[in-house]
Image (cartoon, grey):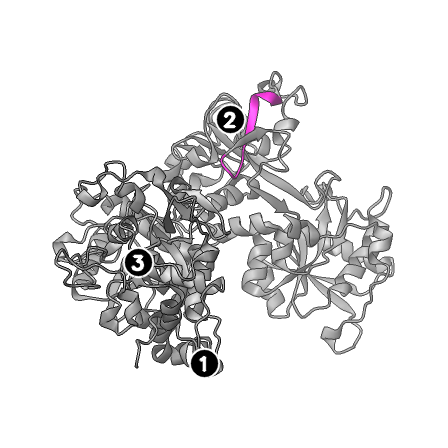
Amino acid sequence: MGSHSAARVTLSAAASWASLSLWSPAHSGEQVTEVRWCTISDAEQLKCQDMSKAFREAGIQPIIACVQGTSAGHCMQLISAQKADAVTLDGEAIYEAGKEHGLKPVAGELYDGEVGTAYYAVAVVRKNFSVTINTLKGVKSCHTGLQQTAGWNVPVGFLVETGRLSVMGCDVLTAVSEFFGGSCVPGAGETNHSLSLCRACRGDSSGKWVCDHSPLERYYGYSGAFRCLVEGAGDVAFVRHSTVLENTDGKTQPSWGKALLSQDFELLCRDGSRASVTEWRRCHLAQVPARAVMVRADMDGKLILQLLGEGQLLFNREGSTFQMFSSESYGQKDLDTTLELVPVSTQTYEAWLGQDYLRAMNGLFCDPNKLPDFLRWCVLSTPEFRKCGDMALALSQQKLRPEIQCVWAHSPLQCMEQIQAGHMDAVTLRGEDIYRAGKMFGLVPAAGESYPENSSDSHYAVALVNRDSSSAFSLNELRGKRSCHPDVNSLAGWTVPLGALIHRGSIRPRDCNVIKGVSEFFNGSCVPGSEARGFPSSLCAVCAGDAKGWNKCVANSQERYFGDSGAFRCLTEKAGDVAFVKHTTIFDNTNGYTSEPWAAKLRQQDYQLLCLNGARAEVHQFQACSLAKIPARAVMVRPDTNTFTVYGLLDKAQELFGDDNNKNGFQMFDSYKYRGQDLLFRDVTVQLVPVVEKTTYIAWLGPDYMRAMEGILTPPCSGSGRMQAAGRQCDSLKEGPRHIRQHLSECFTPKPRGS
C-alpha cells in the first residue's frame, strides 16, 4: 500500500495550508469569488448553508454557495458540467467520480491517529471454524448493509476481482445469493434475492423489520454484522478492523457481547492464511480510503485547500459558533470521527483509493446498460463455426448473457484486427498469438484455460542433458554442441529455446538471419520439418530417419527423433548433446513408464536440466530450472471490454456444459463430434479460470516466455546488413497493424535459405 499512503501528507493545520494561493490558473488569472459546493441531502444542504454563513462572517474568501444535488452521481454531473465546483464523497463514489467524470481529490478526512486517512475492511470468523478466503463458497455471511463499503462493496468486489466469485451480466445480487449459503444483508429485502440475502437476518426483538437497512435490524451495521457471527446466524462477518476489539473483552455493554473474548476470533487474509484480529494491518481485504473533497481536473486545488484550511483553523475547536466536523445537530454523524482535513499530495483518484481498494472497485463497478447484447466470437474453420453455433444456441436456451454470435475469420491475425476495430469481441489464442494480440493490437486476457495437473498440456520448456561429470556443460556453453528438437513447429522445443538463447546473447544472428545464426551456433541439429522449409542442412544433420534410414528429418513419426520423445531419444542415443523438450518428456520415457524398447532401461536420475542462470538442476526441479513456462491459451478481448462479465458468462456456461458427461446437450471442451480438435477451447481443458492479477498479455505470458518471444521477434543482430535486415524483419512490428501482415510471418518464421 505504499502508493496509497504516499498520496496523503498529514501536516499540522497551521503548516498545511499557510502557503496556498487563491489565484487559480484554471480561471485565466482572475481571482475566484465563489465556490459552489454540491450537497447530496437536505441535512447536508443545511450544514453547507451554515458553513457558508460562518465562513462569510469570519471573512474567509471566496464565498461558498451551496448547490443541492439529488445524489452523489448527480453532483458529479453538475461539477463536470461546471454548474458546481466541489463535493465530498466516499470511496465508491470517489472511484466513479474519477473513472467516469475525471474528477480529482484535493483534500481528505483525517480520522484517529492509528489509521490516519483510512480504515481496513476485514473478514472475521470464529477461531474454531475452519474456513479461509478461498473456501467461502457455501458458508453463511453477515454484512453491515447493502452497498456499505466494508460490509458489501469491498468483500464482494474483492471476491469478483480475484475470480472467486463470477458475475454474469453485472448481476451482482444473483452472484452473491448463489455463492453464499444464506446471508444477512440489511437492505436486500426489497430485491429479488431477499430469500437468500436476508435468510440470516432476525429483525428487532419482536421479529419485525427483518433485513431492514437500519438499526431496527439487529444485525445491521458493524456491531450488528459481528453479532450475526457471534450468535451463529453466519459463519463470516465483513466489518471494519476495529469492530471485534470494540465489541469484546468487556468493552461493550449489550448482553450479547459481554462474555466475548477477542482471542476467540480470527481474520481471513487475502493470501488464504488466517491471523489474529489485532493483525489487521497485514491481514485485510482492502484499506478503505477516507472521504475526500473532489473537484474538476482543470480546477486549481489550492483554492479549495486554502478555503477549507482557514475554515478548520476557526471552526474545529470547542466553543466555536460552527462545528465543521460535527453533524449531530443535522441528524447525521457522517463527519463525527474526522479530526481534520489534510491535503492530497498526489491529486489522482487512483492514488487516493489505493491499490487493493481500486482492484475491489474494478470488480464491483459494472454498468448493465453498457454491456453489449452479444459477444461476437471469432472462429477460424468450418468445424469451429459449427461448434460455436451449437454453443451459442445452448447458452441462449439457458438464458446466459450476453448471447454468443459466431463470426468467421481467415487467421488469428484477422481476428486480432477485427477485435481491435470493434467488429468482433473475443477469440481464444495460444502463446505466440497472445503475444502478437497484446503487443500489436492492445488486446487483454479475459479468461484462461486450465489443464490437468502434471500433464504435458501444462508444461515448461526445458533443456535436458545427460548427467556426465567428466564433460558437463552449462547453458552458457552450448556453442558447438549438437541439439535435438521435437520439430520446427514446437513451441517448447524450438521457438522458446531459440528465443531464450537469442535474448541472452548466446546466439547473435548475422544480418538478422535467425535460422542461419542457429545453424552456425550448434554443431549439427535435428529439427524435423526444417528441410521442407529450405533451412540449412546442418539442422537435419543428426536426424536418423526410419529403420532403413529413409524419411530423414520429416516432421512425422517416420523420423525416429520426431516429437518430444524423439528428441529425448536423440539425446539418449548420443546423436545430440542437449534436447529441448517439454518437462514431462523425461517422466514419460524413463523408469519403466513406456514400453518403447529404446527407453526400457532409462532412469530419470541419469539426466539433468540446464538453467537460465548457468546452473544445473535435477529433472524434478523444472519449475525453478526451465527456459519458460508455456502459457495456457487465453480468451483475448479489447481493453475496454468488461472482462469480469466475459468470465462470468463462461463460468456459468462451464457449470452447465464443462463436464464432458453433462446431460445438457453440449460439451464445451470436446470437439470430437465436429471432427476437429481444440475447437474454441483445447479439448484437454479442465476448466476456464479468471485472469486475476494477470490482466495484461505480459503478465499472462510470464517474464521468461516474454523474453523468448522478444528474442525471436527483435533479435540482437550483427554484421553489415544489421540495420537493413532488422528493419525488414522485425522493427516494422512497431509500426502497428497496417504493416503487420507484411512482416509478422518473417519474424515468427524467418525466411528459409535462398529466399
Secondary structure beneath label 1? helix
Residue where numbered disc 3 is placed: 485
What is the distance, in whole Å, between disc 2 and disc 1 at their CAs?
Answer: 65 Å
Q: Is residue 165 above or below residue 80?
A: above
> Residue 582 placed where, x, y %?
33, 50
Which stretch is magenta?
A: 262-272
The mark that comes first in sequence, 2 or 1, is 2
Residue closer to the observer: 298 or 746: 746
Is residue 723 something that shows in the picture? yes
Do callouts 3 and 2 mark residues in contact (Cβ within 8 Å)?
A: no
Kind of residue sitting beneath label 2:
Leu
Q: Which residue is mark 1?
A: 727
**Along the horizontal axis of the image, is 19 left or right of 465?**
right
Q: Relative to residue 611, is residue 550 depicted above or below?
A: below
Q: Position of residue 376 (x, y in %)?
A: 29, 65
Question: What's the residue type where badge 3 is placed?
Answer: His
Residue 144, magenta (yes or no) = no
For the point 41% across and 63% down, which residue is it?
Answer: 499
